[in-house]
Amino acid sequence: MARQSLQLELAERPTGPIIPGKTFRQTRIDAPTEADLKDGQVLIECLYVSLDPAMRGWLDDRRSYLPPVAIGEVMRAAAVARVLASRSKKAAPGDIVTSLMGIREVAIVGEDKIETAAELGVKLAKAGENGPRVTDLLGVFGLTGMTAYFGMMKIGEPKAGDTVVVSAAAGATGSVAAQIAKIAGARVIGTAGSDEKCRWLKEELGLDVALNYKDPEFKAKFKEATPKFIDVFFDNVGGEQLDMALGRANTFSRFVMCGGISQYNATTKSGPTANFMNVVTQRIKMQGFIVFDFAKQYPVAREQIGRWLAEGKLQRKETIIKGGIAGSEDALNHLFQGKNIGKLLVEVKNPEEAPRL
Amino acid sequence: MARQSLQLELAERPTGPIIPGKTFRQTRIDAPTEADLKDGQVLIECLYVSLDPAMRGWLDDRRSYLPPVAIGEVMRAAAVARVLASRSKKAAPGDIVTSLMGIREVAIVGEDKIETAAELGVKLAKAGENGPRVTDLLGVFGLTGMTAYFGMMKIGEPKAGDTVVVSAAAGATGSVAAQIAKIAGARVIGTAGSDEKCRWLKEELGLDVALNYKDPEFKAKFKEATPKFIDVFFDNVGGEQLDMALGRANTFSRFVMCGGISQYNATTKSGPTANFMNVVTQRIKMQGFIVFDFAKQYPVAREQIGRWLAEGKLQRKETIIKGGIAGSEDALNHLFQGKNIGKLLVEVKNPEEAPRL
């Protein structure tokens, strides 16, 4: 019997949260094979799928930085994969690559749609104890790591002594952004949704303050934690936390507009409210960005992140769901339920327990 | 009998709109005289008071770019005044100066609190037919003109062919901002609150499109007027118009956050809502500013504006209320009732019908 490939297809657009069994359809097809390859293509099998809040936005039919996933289409997702067969000089069977291959087990993709570890600029020799793992290709070296790096470095531009606040600081992007601000010498405050996450932020990542936004005293503690106001706010949450940050914004502060997870599932979207006019009165620069805009500079960022990893200056955590493609549908909602710490991944095939590269 | 000086003092902080007879108190005092002057001071009498939406913000007791006007204090306002007596080398009796002297007829101010026409860099020789008038010192050469200039030039940075939208385009700031964008070669759309204002914007100022926001078809027309989306949005209004602009924002567009007149009197403040996440997805730079930050560069701006005036490239209109200090209280609300076209001024003393300088 031919190898089967399970894939997750968009069945209908959600208006609120993703509804398992309704939003997506799981389809098992005959996997493509080496015989199906054309010149310049590779046959790959998925090892880990990256699950990210931004994926919720890809389901909405509205003007954005990427077209929405079409009904019936395989759900778009970044993955780390192994090459099974190749008609490309770029990759040989056995190579580990990343690709926006979608949530499926096996796929044929063009060589322009893959990046090899070497291309990613991941320095293996210098890796040492904290060296890169396969899953880091989706995490600190992947889109979330790049997002954190460029958002913080190019828009936030933290200086020593600045007060930097990162919302959703225990997420894949937030946790890297917060540590980059620490490396820059800033006083860093992170917000997260559980005491466990806050402990990780303070004890492992070395943040100065970590605040649980579910704490009834959150607002008062947020104010107390920002006596000199906020110089950089790296926002992954939007809504009320953004408004609070605006209320505590320093003059000439930079608001790195990275995401708004509080709004992705909301049927009635809201933005900042009571404190929005502080954009004017405090001369705030609020700037949105998409990581793809910095694609040409990824190698520089990866080299720096690789150095920080090797020097032990950068920590990362992964929450790995073992349910395979079948479990990815439910796992996607973990992001909005705050279940993950650090990078959320679905393991589709374990290449000997995510070995060092 | 000693000369009397009428002044407008803050009686209580308004929670919504300014309430004539309640928010302020009109007090008549013995005017200060030459005998009261100390070294470095000048005795001035007010000719015109500048009325600006930002003044509403000065009444709220919240952190801002200036401390709030204190209860019992003379209401802060810019004015053009004539020097009656001087113990300063900076100005002689008869000189025309501008000063943040507040809403009152006669005042003693320090020489550091006045600017003379010469200091303003207003080039009289090149003035010609469109040459500067006394009232222009508060308008195109004053804070509203400077606001328009620096907001548009330094943050908006319109390029030829850009689509630029200016909200409250018939106001003192908006009308100058819109014309600067036209001079830069942009396609310029202005919003305003009456058909009369829209006619002025199109027929006199040469805007490409002028839209009355009270038109039931405003939303549809706004969309229709921005087929290539918005590259620069110069916002004086906030709220719903800002949200509409976000919905039509182009990638990498610049949002010049100048003011939000729709919110100043609101008891429950609101910001952008449904389209706020476009800040991220369209990579918008939303930047607030306060004109005072550019104070050192005012001379450059005034020289340029003087040239544009002389060349007939820049038009301006004034709405002058003749009620004197007594009428200024009611006149302040004209701003929020949309009664003024262009610069709103209160004439306190007419120096022979606002002569050319």
Image: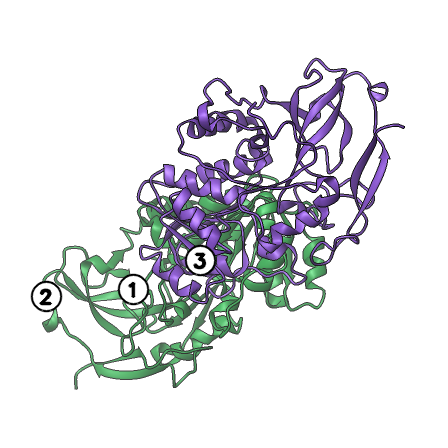
Chain colours: A purple, B green
**Image coords of residue A34 (percent x, y):** 82, 19
Q: CA distance from mark 2 to mark 1?
A: 19 Å
Query: In front: B172, or A218?
Result: A218
**Residue holding disc 3:** A246
- The quadrant the N terminus of chain B occupies is bottom left
Looking at the image, is mark 3 or mark 2 nearer the viewer?
3
Up/down of B203 relative to B330, above or below: above
Q: Residues within 10 Å of mark 3 (few under 14, many from 20)?
A: many
Q: Earlier in the sequence, mark 2 or mark 1?
A: 2
Chain under callout 3: A
Q: Residues within 10 Å of mark 2 (few under 14, many from 20)?
A: some
Q: Quadrant of residue B239?
A: bottom right
Q: Is label 2 in a helix, a strand or a loop?
A: loop
Q: Is residue B245 visible?
A: no
**Image coords of residue B349 (percent x, y):** 32, 73
Residue extending farthest to the top is A89
Q: Tell me the residue at 84%/38% (across/down).
A: A28
**Residue holding disc 2:** B38
Q: CA distance from mark 3 to mark 2?
A: 44 Å
Q: Is residue A75 visible?
A: yes
**Residue holding disc 1:** B100
Q: Tell me the residue at 27%/51% (across/down).
A: B118
**Image coords of residue A284 (percent x, y):** 43, 52
